[in-house]
Image (cartoon, grey):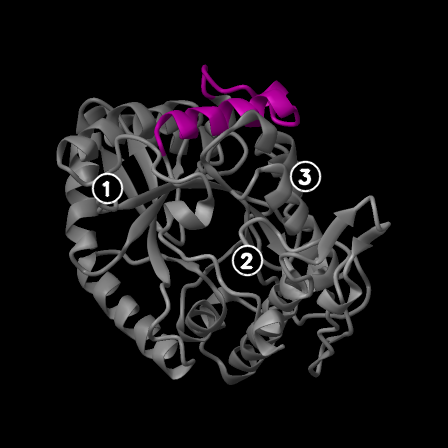
Amino acid sequence: MPRPRPALHLAVALDGAGWHPAAWRQPDARPDELLTARYWSDLVAEAERGLLDFVTIEDSLGLQSTDYNITDGRTDQVRGRLDAVLTAARIAPLTGNIGLIPTAVATHTEPFHLSKAIATLDYVSTGRAGVRVQVSARPYEAALFGRRTFPPFRLEDFDQPEVQSLVTESFEEAADYVEVVRRLWDSWEDDAEIRDTATGRFVDRHKLHYIDFESPTFSVKGPSITPRPPQGQPVVAALAHATIPYRLLARSSDVGFVTPRDSSQAAAVLAEIRAEQAAAGRADEILHVFGDLVVFLDDDPASAVHRRDHLDELAGSAYGSDAHVFAGTPAQLADLLQDWQQAGLTGFRLRPATVPHDLEQITRRLVPEIQRRGLFRTSYEANTLRGLLGLPRPANRYAAAV
């Protein structure tokens, strides 16, 4: 008899020493190891120990900055990072079940390159790869490439017509980007490789397909140089905060990350995404929507709040985030997750404020609590990321057309 699917999906977002800018100054932090394979493999091993669905790994194409438009020049916060896709590839052979979703900035990278990088990650991980597609309109990141420019704007002006036009154009480009990547993953049929030493035929050329994609931004002939990934289609994820980005989730992703402040807002966001999903013709497809939260976790609420306040004092300002910031006990967080789950969210991506403390609070305290409530798996029930998320392995679009 098949095992029931877990009632709740859980992931963590890994970024440096943690999401609080002063996390690297904590006594248990390892700032001198941030650029080592051992550091990242330790974090992912801890996440896998907690039976989490996947980890995401943050990335960018410019130095971290507190200012959206320029690099801030600060020297009291972590600056510099490893490439997320390469980090995931290094970690993959050291893990066996957890999904690996590195971040890739679609705005300045070529979809052909990303398609084969993520396909390779899927092979290296034996079917546990994904990618979080990120859009960037930061002027200083564009200046690193010199192929395009973006005007500076304040996030407070997001609703202004000129900013909305820029956002619309950027996210439409991202949707085309994902479509190119997905078509390239399908450009080899599953059995295109014959590998017949007797006849000397390694590949059936009739099972490799040109994708011939044309859009205002991309002209890609294909096929890929990497055979179809083990999952067929690795998992595509994206973070969204407003209507235009919600359309990218609805049209192009398997997993969307959203940032509600309470359960009622979560329900409203989810309703908008589901409407966009139906408008995109995907109403019958599984699209997971995860709520994002930054978490400070301790044995009692006062300790969690005190630790957050201490970190704020070290940083010189109160911590703020695009996501809800939670400070309390793992049991209190479990209550909140249950409440938000009732709004329709299928999972949560937690951002540990400090590493390793808050990561271990998630894996060693929160997970047992939600297991006790019957909300989370007690063992891994699939060996691919799509399997963990209940996503079917899709048919190859080009093979089906033959």
Which callout, 1 or 3, points at the residue further toward the start of the chain? 1
Bin the neighbour count of mark 1 within 10 Å (Cα to Cα): few under 14, some 14-19, many 20 and up: few
Quarter of the picture containing the C terminus is: bottom right
Q: Earlier in the sequence, mark 2 or mark 1?
A: 1
Main secondary structure along the magenta-highlighted residues: helix
Whether residue 198 sits left or right of residue 330 in the image: it is right
Residue ranking furthest to the top = 27
Q: Using the image, tell me which numbered label, if any, was put on residue 86.
A: 3
Q: Residue at x 18, y 30 (%)?
A: 369
Q: Nearer the viewer, residue 3 or 116?
A: 3
Q: Looking at the rendering, which quadrant does residue 77 occupy?
A: top right
Q: Is residue 41 magenta?
A: yes
Q: Secondary structure at mark 3?
A: helix
Vertical side of 192 occupied by 385: above or below: above
**Looking at the rendering, in which quadrant would you find the N terminus?**
top left
Quadrant of residue 280 in the image? bottom left
Q: Secondary structure at mark 2?
A: loop
Q: Is residue 63 left or right of residue 305?
A: right
Which mark, by number, is residue 258? none
Vertical position of residue 352 compared to residue 257: above or below: above
270 vs 332: above or below: below
Type of the residue with mark 2? Gln
Kind of residue indicated by mark 3: Leu
The residue labelled by disc 2 is 233
**According to the image, label 1 marks what residue?**
3
The answer for how far apart the CA atoms under marks 1 and 3 are is 35 Å
Q: Which of 271/204 is in front?
A: 204
Q: Nearer the viewer, mark 1 or mark 3?
A: 1
Magenta stretch bounds: 26-51
Residue closest to the eye, 27 or 382: 382
Q: CA distance from mark 2 to mark 1?
A: 24 Å
